[in-house]
Amino acid sequence: MDLGTNDPVSPPRRPPIRTLTFGIADVHPIAPEVFDQTAQLAKRMEQSCQDAGYEVQTLRLSTRPIFEDLTGDIVAYARALSTLLTDLGLPLCSVGPAPAADPRFPLERLDVLGDMLIEANVLTSGVQLATAEHGIRVDAALPAARIMRRLAMETKEGLGNFRFAALACVEPGGPFFPASYHTGPAAVTIGLQGAGIVAEALADVRAVDPPSITRHVRAALIEHATPIVGLAQRLAGELGVRFGGIDLSPAPAGDDSIAAAVEQCGHGPIGSPGSLSIAAALTEALRTTGLPTTGYTGLMLPVCEDKVLADRWADGHLSVHQLLCLSAVCGTGLDTVPLPGDTSPEQIAHILLDVASLAYRLRKPLSARLFPVPGARPGDRTSFSSPYLVNTTVRP
């Protein structure tokens, strides 16, 4: 006998909104009142989402690439901007990547990027190494690698690299940092913490062939994300900004693990044979929902943001090359990958060129956010204090 038939039906679990990212249209230098007005809009939208039952984890601002607009004292401007944003209660703002793929961009300007990120710790940025228009700028990889080395050595625990990435074929309009940047009219985009949606969908899959994985995950994404898109479209209209889309990449967070979801398919630890087919099936689901998407919209595998991924990295089931292989059919490239502290700029540059080559060859957005860990040797355990990171073992 069903004794619960008179109980109300529980509503489906609502996934957290990882970020509401507001894109600012204005050219740098942007007036303080523009940031103030945008902050007010962001907080109004945050409250409305919370009133609708959604947890909003972060509010973020994204601007035009700063290097395309300013040639003066970028560091002083960034320092003032960081103070302003902190006063406004907005801890994250992406000022876009340096357009290094463009052969007209002078690579010596990249030297100031490290200064900017060290001085202004609420800003994120990057270096665009490849675009469909210009191809790969090979000689930009080493300066980008030197920035990573410098941030590792000159910021607490090397976590300046949390706010910096090398990009390849990344278009504007994505909500996830540090790859986000904006062009066009003011807009808002959404990124989900969607690992739980995928895990829930795969828990119901009996036949774990790729078409079944795609069908189940697509249906779950449509169920959970459609109301969020509808809400965002309505709120954007009320606020007078454009809705720029949703990035359905299933971002993990600690125990809310995308790797654990993948392993539910029964092919063994992620990185085992069969992982590539699962990654491809999940990406197919993410890209065929019919929803207005933006950004990566692919499988996201950040080693130090996902507990199971961190464990698999530590025990050798994953390597840089395996992650690159998975990136051929999924999402973001190499993300929060810990490296020995003595990894040379030349070695880092080789990794960045691999990512750029894959992105350019496949015409897809990829990025590399690498963490040389100060003083760490292969076999050492990381000791990140950030609540957003999971510790793991440094490997060669």
Image (cartoon, grey):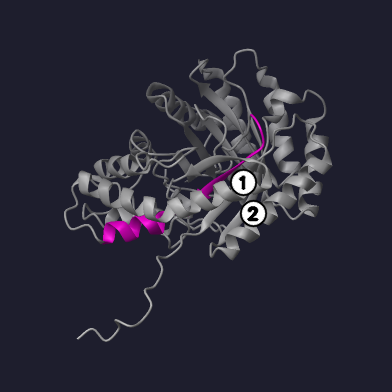
Q: Amino acid at mark 2?
A: Met
Label 1 CA crowd tier, 10 Å (few <14, some 14–19, many 20+): many
Q: Amino acid at mark 1?
A: Ala
Dot in front, 2 or 1: 1
Q: Is residue 191 magenta?
A: yes
Of residues 142 and 276, the one nearer the viewer is: 276
Picture quadrant of residue 255: bottom left
Residue plotted at (54% across, 38% down) = 174
* Structural distance between the alpha carbons of marks 2 and 1: 8 Å
The reply to whether discs 2 and 1 touch (Cβ–Cβ < 8 Å) is: yes
Residue 226 picture location, percent across and down: 44, 51
Residue 221 picture location, percent across and down: 38, 51
Residue 187 picture location, percent across and down: 63, 39
Give the numbered dot on residue 45. Answer: 2
Give the numbered dot on residue 236. Answer: 1
Residue 292 picture location, percent across and down: 46, 40
